[in-house]
Amino acid sequence: MTRTKSRLLLCALVVAGIAGCDAGGPAVSPSASASGNRQQLLALGQEWVRCLRDHGLTRMPDVELSQEGYLQFPAVDGYNWKEDLRTHRDIINACQSIEDRYPPNAFRPRQQFSADDLRKLAAYAKCVREHGVPDFPDPNAAGEFDVTGTSLEHGIPGRLRDQADAACHTIWSGDVRVTGGTGGRK
């Protein structure tokens, strides 16, 4: 088979939109390929959401793709779907086969906290307690503040949170992740 016929055959086998052909042979289009991968990832996320809803997690938010191409499930009205899902092992098991198909880079990597960051977060928690939120917990190893079993489980009163934020922002100005409750403001 001649070189030209080989190229033509290869071009005929390439899926439209993912690669193009010219006289020099096939040329992969990175933007079309990346767009195709993003759409496949979004479709997989939508399939997972449908499964969760079909098995009882009816308030599961719709999936979105972040600017960077990661899956995200933004909370609606302060609903903590992760906490709700943790308490329903049967739903997790029912949809596990879909979740297993996620590629390794489907989600934004978790921020890793250094020992110095964790010390600052602990100092931030102490400051918040001293400025009107006495039940505010210390951070866990992931840098999260778990309010499970505290008076803050259903939210931190807005005025107290604002007061503490104003007093303590010089200690820690990064994200403050509250878990184990609604995490909202009262």
Image (cartoon, helix red, strand yellow):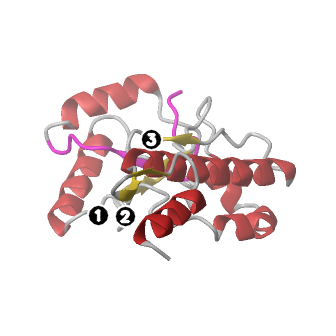
- Residue 132 position, x and y percent, is 34, 34
Magenta segment includes 176: yes
Image mark for residue 66: 3
Q: Nearer the viewer, mark 3 or mark 1?
A: 3
Q: Which residues are magenta?
A: 171-186
Q: Secondary structure at mark 1?
A: loop
Spatial CA distance of label 2 from label 1 is 7 Å
Q: Residues within 10 Å of mark 3 (few under 14, many from 20)?
A: few
Location of residue 83 (image quadrant): bottom right
The local crowd at label 2, few if under 14, some if 14 to 19, many if 20 or more residues have their Cα within 10 Å, is few
Q: Secondary structure at mark 2?
A: loop
Q: Name which residue type carries label 3.
A: Ser
Q: Amino acid at mark 2?
A: Ala
Q: First in sequence: mark 3 or mark 2? A: 3
- State whether residue 131 is above or below residue 106: above
- Mostly what secondary structure, the magenta segment? loop
In this rendering, does residue 139 appear at all? Answer: yes
Q: Position of residue 183 (x, y in %)?
A: 52, 40
Q: Nearer the viewer, residue 49 or 156?
A: 49
Residue at left 50%, top 77%? 1
* Res. 135 in view: no
Q: Which of these two is toward me, 3 or 69?
A: 3
In this view, which residue lies farthest toward the top? 159
Q: Quadrant of residue 173?
A: top left
Residue bearing the label numbered 1: 112
The residue positioned 56% from the left and 39% from the top of the image is: 64
Residue positioned 20% across, 32% down in the render? 167
Query: In terms of sequence position, does the residue under pointer 2 or pointer 1 come before the other?
Result: 1
Residue at position x 58%, y 58% in the image = 12
Question: Marks 3 and 1, how far apart in space?
Answer: 20 Å
Q: Are marks 2 and 1 in contact (CB under 8 Å)?
A: no
To which residue does mark 2 refer?
Answer: 142
